[in-house]
DNA sequence: CAACAAAGGGTAATCGATTGCACAATTTAA
DNA sequence: TTAAATTGTGCAATCGATTACCCTTTGTTG
């Protein structure tokens, strides 16, 4: 139970009878130190179990080797996968990650910004809250040149890099899939239209309809908050109508789930009477009955890519930092559309 | 686009024509500073937009105000809820959180320990990987007096505080519920028996059987890794048998799900032919068809409680640090047992 | 061989906040 | 009135790593 105090570069220096600065340089692979000395230092460091004190180093260099992440909620599978991707890459590059949840509320998102700023993170990855319409708080970062990358729910008002999946194509193949299954009246439950991802999903859907000469019926397109409850309201609106659709493409899986549950409740057969396609491939979409056809988007890949972008900006502050990366999506066919 | 450099205590000191140490003390509410001075300092700090530099402070005090968390995987709902609880409390108390995922592998868990140790966290909250049998790596913390608290999947070999839910009672009420529904042969799919939680769930189940004078049949009790695949294997073993049970209590929801899916596949009716109860109340358990009766355990509460315990130890190093806190569980009745 | 360059490494200041100790001013006690 | 105690602040060292600048050697060049 020794209270073994951490070894410092000075312990190494003393052991080798050289100066601390030499040790520091040797460990940082500085070209002014001879190979022989470097080896000696590294060996001694290992022998003494040296662990660099990040605090001291960070204080001096005034970078924290920490990146901040702002997400709506960690319990959504897409986001927890993104976190996994972010953490994995960040850690191998020597960065720590601080996670903040906005709970999909603009005010809490602003809090997150403050928290991360106070923690002096070197960069930030964010996916904005569903009701955020004002982006002033993000200027805390941009004004001070703290790199910022958005993913999934991005923001065009700020000039930053971003990583998204191909929502347009996702909407397109979802709708075209339903068309190929012989559906005639395809409704869409879209998300808030101030968010690009939902605009794009809707536009993809519209393009598919037009391509196949379908009439676009306003009443079949509903904007929703995409929660469980809101999804149920949408389901009622669409399915209780006398002229109900024979297919619904929902902008997320939760809404699609609400549809399925309500449809079953009122005795509709899925997919015979109503085909359903969701978006995201949340884990439950495979287990729900009937299992849900959906568009797969890899949170892990998005997170990894966003981190790659961010770390590039952090380490190499020059260059174009308004890149947009679009990752592919894929249709996962399951029972809810299999007719 | 000013490169506004962060203000330091010395900027405040200069503005008020006092010394840095006074400012430091004032901000820390030191009793040796007059109220008048404190107020002046606080006002000026606000006016200048002062943000303390945690790096400097931490270097001096050699504590990082950071706690580390090791969990099997963030994408499991129970754990992401726990994280939410941990982060929320930690942040209000001025701590940051670093999360590491072991992916349920002992080797990666050891890596996490190293990472957190190198980050010089002030304390650690951990839930051990499913196959961890050797706890040597945790001595990195205990040997150096770094507080450690386990939750959910705890470890008895190390003398630490821990937070669990009442697994015994959970197992008991699950089994008793099935008995009350008239089930006669109740099987149990248990988890690895080197983990307390699974031992307790099994013991609770056994107690309920004995209380109601049920015969305990060895062949109805299976040990499993509780994955989706393993669950399917267990389902086959139990349901393909000539003398199949009429109820199954699974130690987690994933296994229960596997049971349900396989039972449906071979044409069994649930709950008429087979009643099923799971454990955890994962979100999908509500959506699966038939919806799953399960034992609810609040990840959020467990996380919060564990953090409370840990921060207590960190701030008040004395006292008994081998407390065990048991949180309540609750039966959630759904279709899979409703007969 | 003078003069200079390169290689290798040391000195000391620095990042910003904290804190033991010293000390002046004021109050209290005797 | 004087010694002692209390209050309120300042000085300077400190945490550990980094780095601008300086100083030796040793080697190179005309």
Image (cartoon, coloured by chain):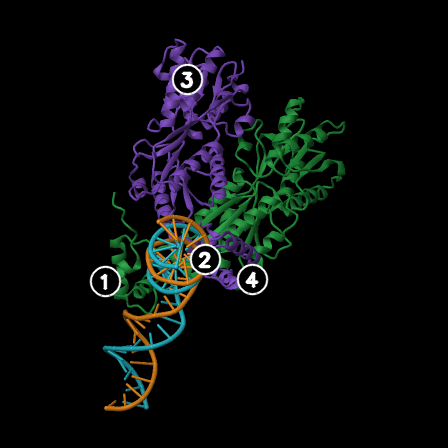
Chain colours: A green, B purple, C orange, D cyan
User: Percent position (x, y) of residue C17?
Assistant: 44, 55
Quadrant, the C terminus of chain A: top right
Above or below B157: residue D19: below
Q: Quadrant of residue B215?
A: top left
Front-most of residues A184 and B166: B166
Provide the residue designation for mark 4: A320
Q: Chain of mark 1?
A: A
Asked if marks 2 and 4 touch (Cβ < 8 Å), the reply is: no
| Residue located at (41% from left, 24% from top) | B167
Evaluate whether residue A69 shows in this view. yes
Asked if marks 1 and 3 touch (Cβ < 8 Å), the reply is: no
Report the disc number at residue B22. 2
User: Percent position (x, y) of residue B330?
Assistant: 49, 22
Provide the residue designation for mark 1: A16
| Residue located at (36% from left, 55% from top) | A53
Quadrant, the N terminus of chain A: top left
Provide the residue designation for mark 3: B187
The answer as to whether the residues below labels 3 and 2 share one chain is yes
Tag in front: 3 or 2: 2
**SS assignment at label 3:** strand
The answer as to whether the residues below labels 2 and 4 share one chain is no
User: Percent position (x, y) of residue A240?
Assistant: 73, 26
Distance between mark 1 and mark 4 Cα atoms:
46 Å
Distance between mark 1 and mark 3 Cα atoms:
66 Å
């Amino acid at each position: 139970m020794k209270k073994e105090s951490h070894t410092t570069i000075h312990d190494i220096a003393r052991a080798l009878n050289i100066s601390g600065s030499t040790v520091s340089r040797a460990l940082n692979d500085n070209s002014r130190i001879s190979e022989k000395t470097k080896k000696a230092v590294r060996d001694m460091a290992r022998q003494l179990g040296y662990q660099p004190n990040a605090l001291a180093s960070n204080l001096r260099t005034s970078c924290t080797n920490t990146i901040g992440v702002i997400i709506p909620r960690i319990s959504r599978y897409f986001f927890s996968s993104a976190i996994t991707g972010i953490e994995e890459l960040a850690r191998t590059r020597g960065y720590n990650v601080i996670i903040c949840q906005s709970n999909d509320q603009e005010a809490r998102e602003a809090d997150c910004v403050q928290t991360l700023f106070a923690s002096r993170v070197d960069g930030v990855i964010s996916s904005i809250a569903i009701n955020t319409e004002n982006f002033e708080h993000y200027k805390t970062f941009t004004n001070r040149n703290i790199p910022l990358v958005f993913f999934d729910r991005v923001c065009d008002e700020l000039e930053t890099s971003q990583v998204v999946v191909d929502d347009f194509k996702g909407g397109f193949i979802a709708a075209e899939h339903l068309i190929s299954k012989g559906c005639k009246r395809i409704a869409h439950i879209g998300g808030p239209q101030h968010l690009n991802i939902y605009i794009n999903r809707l536009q993809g859907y519209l393009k598919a309809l037009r391509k196949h000469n379908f009439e676009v019926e306003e009443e079949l397109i509903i904007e929703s908050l995409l929660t469980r409850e809101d999804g149920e309201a949408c389901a009622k609106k669409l399915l209780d109508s006398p002229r109900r659709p024979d297919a619904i493409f929902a902008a997320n899986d939760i809404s699609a789930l609400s549809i399925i549950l309500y449809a079953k409740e009122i005795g509709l057969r899925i997919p015979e009477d109503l085909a359903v396609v969701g978006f995201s491939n949340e884990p439950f979409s495979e287990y729900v009955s009937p299992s849900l056809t959906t568009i797969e988007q890899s949170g892990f890949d998005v997170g990894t890519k966003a981190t790659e972008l961010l770390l590039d900006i952090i380490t190499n502050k020059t260059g174009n930092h308004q890149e947009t990366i679009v990752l592919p999506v894929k249709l996962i066919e399951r029972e809810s559309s299999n007719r």
